[in-house]
Amino acid sequence: MTDPGAPALLRNLASWQAGRVSTLGARFTAARMPLEARSDFAVLATLREYGELSQTELGRRLGLDRNNVNGIVTRLENNGHVERRTDPADRRRNIVASTAAGLQHLDDLHALALDVQNELLVALDPDERHQLRVLLEKVLTSHPAQPA
Amino acid sequence: MTDPGAPALLRNLASWQAGRVSTLGARFTAARMPLEARSDFAVLATLREYGELSQTELGRRLGLDRNNVNGIVTRLENNGHVERRTDPADRRRNIVASTAAGLQHLDDLHALALDVQNELLVALDPDERHQLRVLLEKVLTSHPAQPA
DNA sequence: AACCAATGTTGGTCTCACCAACGTATCACG
DNA sequence: CGTGATACGTTGGTGAGACCAACATTGGTT
């Protein structure tokens, strides 16, 4: 309907639509903070909700693969937001734990993320936002979060 | 709710959910065709629906920026799916037109895209799929597709 | 004629998903 | 107990895609 819009073939593909929404989210995010803060936020949020975890476990829960988790954790460690120590019970594992500064950083990022969220979903009323959240969640939980 | 799942903070962010769905779509796509076929599909679909367009116009309608459009069109041209000629009315513009082979290629890709769609949305019944499509569309049309 | 804007093009950065390989550590099993 | 399979972290590399910057050509304006 929108004259300068995408063709119907694309507008009917959820995969394409989701990609565009995701890109818009990234764009709005970048306007407020460095882009890499998104993965920082994901890892810190996971640690706060589940407690200390190994890197592989982090990846499993977030759907990131372990190569990338490594880089994110290293960055967080360098910034003092996270601590890494080897698990005494299984010395292959690195236990990743959030620091006080990390929790603070998480709160800051969370506030910005909610701003982005509001900007992204302006067109939806609270009911529609809830529906969207539920539908996307349904799609996600129906697929195993494979990478490890 | 899913024990080995993402934290609530992320599951409540539409931007994050959309990104994950998009990644899943890309993964399912890659299982059926080369990944780059996605942009080929987008461009060919746009040409079929709107007719011949300049590269900038293509980017405007798809939300791609003109640098990337250039690469995609070049690839399509090398594969014989598209023809490029300079607009006689405005010799700055390249008019991009689909070839017969391009239209055929579009049909092939469309069939594969629908397969991906079905795999991605298994968890949703037809009604829910429609709702999801409408909600995402609403989000997208509320934001100008800026890059040019 | 002089200036500004649009277009295509090239080249480069950054995030992120992925693949491959390696060393260390653990575990299961014969 | 030893041996082989497996898991984990780490490094290095590929490729798509969103960006930014710069340039030459062309068109429009004044």
Image (spheres, coloured by chain):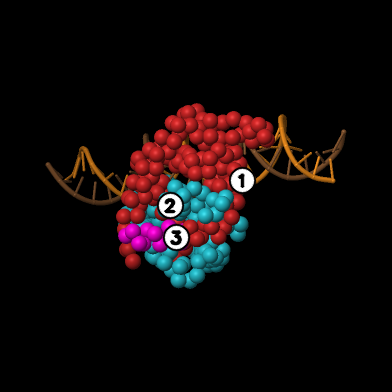
Chain colours: A cyan, B red, C brown, D orange
Rendered residue at 51%/60% (across/down): B139
In the image, residue A59 lies at what x, y percent? Answer: 39, 53
Q: Is residue A127 above or below residue A96?
A: below
Q: Quick one: label 2, few (<14), some, or many (20+) residues within 10 Å?
A: some
Subunit that carries the residue with mark 3: B
In the image, residue A2 lies at what x, y percent? Answer: 55, 54
In the image, residue D28 lies at what x, y percent? Answer: 75, 42
Counting every numbered tag in the picture gives 3
Q: Are marks 3 and 2 in contact (CB under 8 Å)?
A: no
Q: Which residue is mark 1?
A: B148
- Tell me the kind of residue under disc 2: Asn
Q: Which residues are magenta?
A: B124-136
In the shown orientation, is residue B49 left or right of residue B108? right
In this rendering, do the residues under marks 1 and 3 share a single chain? yes
Rendered residue at 44%/36% (across/down): B103
| Helix, strand or loop for disc 1 | loop
* Sequence-earlier tag: 1 or 3: 3
Q: Is residue B33 above or below residue B63?
A: above
Q: Which residue is mark 2?
A: A12
Q: Which residue is mark 3?
A: B134
The one nearer the camera, A25 or A52, is: A25
